[in-house]
Amino acid sequence: DIVMTQSPLSLPVTPGEPASISCRSSQSLLHSNGYNYLDWYLQRPGQSPQLLIYLGSNRASGVPDRFSGSGSGTDFTLTISRVEAEDVGIYYCMHGLQSPLTFGGGTKVEIK
Amino acid sequence: EVRLVQSGAEVKKAGESLKISCKGSGYNFTNYWIDWVRHMPGKGLEWLGIIYPGNSETRYSPSFQGQVTISADKSINTVYLQWSSLKASDTAMYYCARALGGYNWLDPWGQGTLVTVSS
């Protein structure tokens, strides 16, 4: 199985400031078709997870442009350009390269 | 609007059987894989497996193979997750989610079904 490792575990943020979360995979997520099979999800308190970013850098429909995904191969980053109060929750990366799909352990983002 | 609506919370005893459901609407249900994901209290997300409702092709995570059964009834746009003998360690929130790009990213997710198993 591909192991997904996120850091940090917890991220206190100040509204209006940038924030970034790292995700590393135990093997490359770069497919021969040129796409990186890495997604980002946000689970707000009391809600189901929602898709933020797919294929490494594509924002899902309705996701604000302050969210961006970058990276390739085994190292990926989710960046929030200016954090807003509604961005609190747990962020997960997940690979979609092969079965079984696996998730990172999660990063809890909270307001300072 | 694409929606996945899951069945309600369940409280069971260890050893009992259970089948929870996930009903899709707003899209061609038979053409997209549906995943099941577990979220245990205080833990991260775990992928259980996936089903293609069009032909009921199913794949399981090795960690859950033999522990759960995933099935589908395409005539009513519904997929199921079932246990034949629950354990206290099955206590968790279970989510279904539609897979896109083949089965590579998940959107949308159902609202979740909380399963509580007492010993």
Image (cartoon, coloured by chain):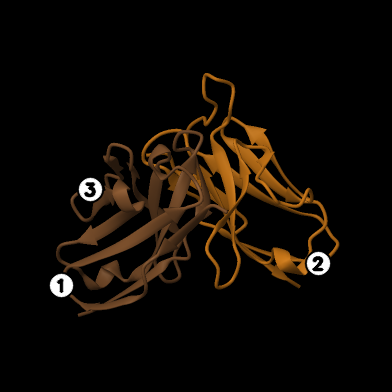
User: Seen in the image, is B17 located left or right of residue B63?
Assistant: left
Residue A8 horizontal/vertical position (percent): 62, 56
Q: What's the residue at 74%, 71% (across, down)?
A: A111
Identify the chain of the residue marked 3, using the numbered disc in the image. Answer: B
Residue A92 horizontal/vertical position (percent): 56, 54
The chain letter of the orange chain reads A
User: Seen in the image, is B67 located left or right of residue A54?
Assistant: left
Per the image, the residue denoted by label 1 is: B16
Do the CB atoms of the residues marked 2 and 1 lie less than 8 Å apart?
no
Q: What's the residue at 20%, 55% (across, down)?
A: B67
Based on the displayed image, in which of its 4 quarters is residue A18 positioned? bottom right
Disc 2 marks a residue whose amino acid type is Thr
Q: Is residue B91 above or below residue A56?
A: below
Q: What's the residue at 79%, 64% (across, down)?
A: A84
Identify the chain of the residue marked 1, using the numbered disc in the image. Answer: B
Residue B62 horizontal/vertical position (percent): 27, 44
Label disc, if present, on residue A14 of the rendered structure: 2
Q: CA distance from mark 2 to mark 1?
A: 48 Å
- Which quarter shows the C terminus of chain B? bottom left
Q: Nearer the viewer, mark 3 or mark 1?
A: 1
Front residue (pair B45, B116): B116
Do the CB atoms of the residues marked 3 and 2 lie less than 8 Å apart?
no
Disc 2 crowd rating (10 Å Cα; few below 14, some 14-19, many 20+) is some
Disc 3 crowd rating (10 Å Cα; few below 14, some 14-19, many 20+) is few
Q: Extreme front residue here?
A: B75
Q: Extreme right residue here?
A: A16
Label 2's element? loop
Residue A47 horizontal/vertical position (percent): 55, 68
Label disc, if present, on residue B65 of the rendered structure: 3
